[in-house]
């Protein structure tokens, strides 16, 4: 009676799909319940007259075509999503994880094979009961089936682990796509900044060369000093050296962009906007830190990896219990090939097997200890992912709250230095002041112009990175239904085909 009860309980556990994995409890987020406020965080930019507003929409609900309005940049992002090799690899990783999950899931089901065999043996006269050589023939054909009764959830735990790994891979792909959108934008903005720097440097070099020519003419005529000549030459040589460095940086920035989009820059790209004309959304709301758990794919990836480690504990625990498998065969057997399907040739076999671990040299205990350690590692990785996400958003908010005032001050400083140069040059030409004041004013203006361009680039890059840090960049247009992280997307004919069947979609 007790035996039947145990079998019934085990069968019920198996039918319910129970495992020995610990009940999963999401770790508490190791960050504050709100982003920092006050100080630099209290001066977040508002939408000015004629500016575009996010209208309170979360970053995840803002399409990248709505965030970036530069048509040239939009086209570059489109090309990158089709061609980028890193993104292709992330898509292929999903296919590999899906196949691995399907392999593991198949172990829960019985296997059924059609089998056929034949054997011919010759026995010598010395061992034959007939006194002469004996030839024995045997043929059989039929079906063979085997099935492991997963009473203690070992295979189920392995399946859950593979499924969680699949979802983690899908989230990694989503993170890669979001990151690619922001990388293309950042690199494009860097190219625009390099163009502006080249323009400033060429203008400075032209002005400096003109001043040098005048100073050299005065020196040659004996009305100017060599000191003034050499001072004028320093500005020319400095601008010339900077021009070479900036042309090199511009070429390398274009090479980096080409790598991101996966092909040379097309000649038919639409006209773009200048750096100071990029109209990015500046008022995307940050929300709460808890929103990052559902907005950030890297955080969701870390949690899925933690779930996989949790399921692995169930498999390690189940290894301490018996493994029960059923093997059977049914078909026909005959000493002649032609008699296989005649009446009276039916044959069958049934061979249940149970394996109970008795001595494994501590392997099962070590595997369980390892599973627990791996889970603690993934807990730490999950908490670190949350902390990194919190820090990225907080840094973005701190920067967003200060760049507008910084750029306004730098614009005033550039204007002041331009006026200073104009007045110094006028005083020098009228003999009121020395050429040193002109040289100093020209050098300061050049530095102020470069600093202003760098600040404009940093402001725009910060807005792009904050958009990414808040989970933006997954949908193309506002209002689009976000596709699951593992959903197939047409990245072009060169992308790999997507399998027909898949697990439940990863969000």
Image (cartoon, helix red, strand yellow):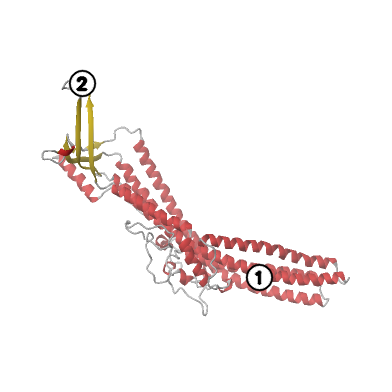
Q: Position of residue 148 (x, y in %)?
A: 25, 43
Residue drawn at x 63%, y 73% is: 411
Q: Quadrant of the N terminus?
A: top left
Residue indicated by mark 2: 125
Is residue 237 rendered to the left or right of residue 291?
right
How far apart in space, not on screen, are marks 1 and 2 (Cα)?
A: 104 Å
Identify the secondary structure beneath mark 1: helix
Residue position marked by numbered label 1 in the rendering: 199
Q: Which mark, residue 432?
A: none
Name the side, left or right, on which 171 lies relative to 347.
right
Residue sitting at the far bottom: 49
The mark total stands at: 2
Give the crowd class for mark 1: few <14, some 14-19, many >=20 residues within 10 Å. Answer: few
Q: In the rendered image, which quarter is residue 452 located in?
A: bottom right
Mark 2, secondary structure of its residue: helix
> In front: 73, or 55?
73
């Amino acid at each position: 009676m007790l035996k039947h009860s145990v079998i019934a309980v085990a069968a019920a556990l198996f039918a319910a799909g129970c495992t020995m994995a610990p009940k999963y409890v999401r770790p508490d987020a190791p960050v504050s319940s709100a982003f920092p406020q006050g100080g630099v965080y209290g001066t977040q930019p508002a939408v000015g007259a004629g500016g575009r507003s996010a209208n309170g929409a979360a970053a995840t609900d803002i399409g990248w075509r709505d965030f970036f309005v530069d048509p040239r940049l939009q086209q570059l992002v489109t090309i990158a999503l089709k061609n980028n090799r890193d993104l292709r690899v992330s898509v292929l990783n999903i296919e590999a994880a899906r196949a691995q999950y399907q392999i593991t899931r198949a172990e829960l089901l019985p296997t059924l094979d059609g089998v056929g065999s034949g054997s011919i043996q010759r026995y010598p006269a010395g061992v034959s009961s007939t006194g002469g050589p004996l030839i024995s023939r045997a043929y059989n054909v039929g079906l063979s089936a085997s099935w492991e009764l997963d009473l203690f959830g070992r295979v189920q735990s392995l399946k859950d682990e593979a499924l969680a790994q699949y979802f983690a891979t899908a989230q990694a792909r989503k993170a890669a796509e979001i990151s690619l959108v922001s990388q293309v934008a950042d690199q494009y903005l860097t190219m625009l900044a390099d163009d502006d720097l080249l323009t400033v440097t060429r203008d400075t070099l032209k002005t400096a060369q003109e001043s040098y020519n005048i100073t050299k003419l005065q020196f040659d005529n004996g009305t100017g000093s060599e000191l003034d000549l050499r001072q004028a030459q320093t500005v020319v040589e400095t601008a010339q050296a900077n021009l070479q460095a900036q042309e090199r940086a511009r070429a390398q920035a274009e090479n980096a962009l080409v790598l991101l989009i996966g092909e040379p820059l097309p000649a038919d790209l639409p006209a773009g906007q200048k750096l100071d004309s990029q109209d990015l959304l500046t008022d995307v709301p940050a929300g709460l830190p808890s929103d990052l758990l559902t907005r950030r794919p890297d955080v969701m990836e870390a949690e899925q990896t933690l779930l996989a480690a949790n399921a692995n504990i169930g498999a390690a625990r189940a290894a301490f219990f018996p493994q029960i498998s059923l093997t059977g065969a049914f078909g026909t057997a005959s000493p002649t090939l032609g008699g296989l399907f005649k009446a009276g040739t039916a044959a069958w076999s049934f061979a249940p097997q149970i394996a109970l671990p008795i001595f494994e040299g501590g392997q099962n205990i070590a595997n369980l200890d390892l599973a627990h350690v791996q889970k603690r590692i993934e807990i730490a990785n999950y908490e670190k992912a949350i902390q990194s996400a919190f820090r990225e958003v907080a840094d973005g908010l701190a920067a967003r709250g200060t760049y507008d005032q910084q750029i306004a001050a730098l614009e005033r400083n550039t204007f002041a230095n331009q006026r200073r140069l104009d007045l110094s040059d006028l005083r020098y030409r009228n003999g009121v002041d020395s050429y040193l004041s002109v040289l100093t004013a020209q050098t300061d203006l050049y530095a102020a112009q470069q600093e202003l361009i760098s600040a404009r680039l940093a402001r725009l890059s910060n807005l792009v990175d904050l958009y990414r840090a808040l989970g933006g960049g997954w949908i193309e247009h506002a209002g689009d239904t976000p596709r699951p992280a593992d959903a197939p997307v047409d990245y072009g004919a060169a992308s790999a085909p997507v399998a027909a069947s898949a697990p439940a979609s990863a969000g």
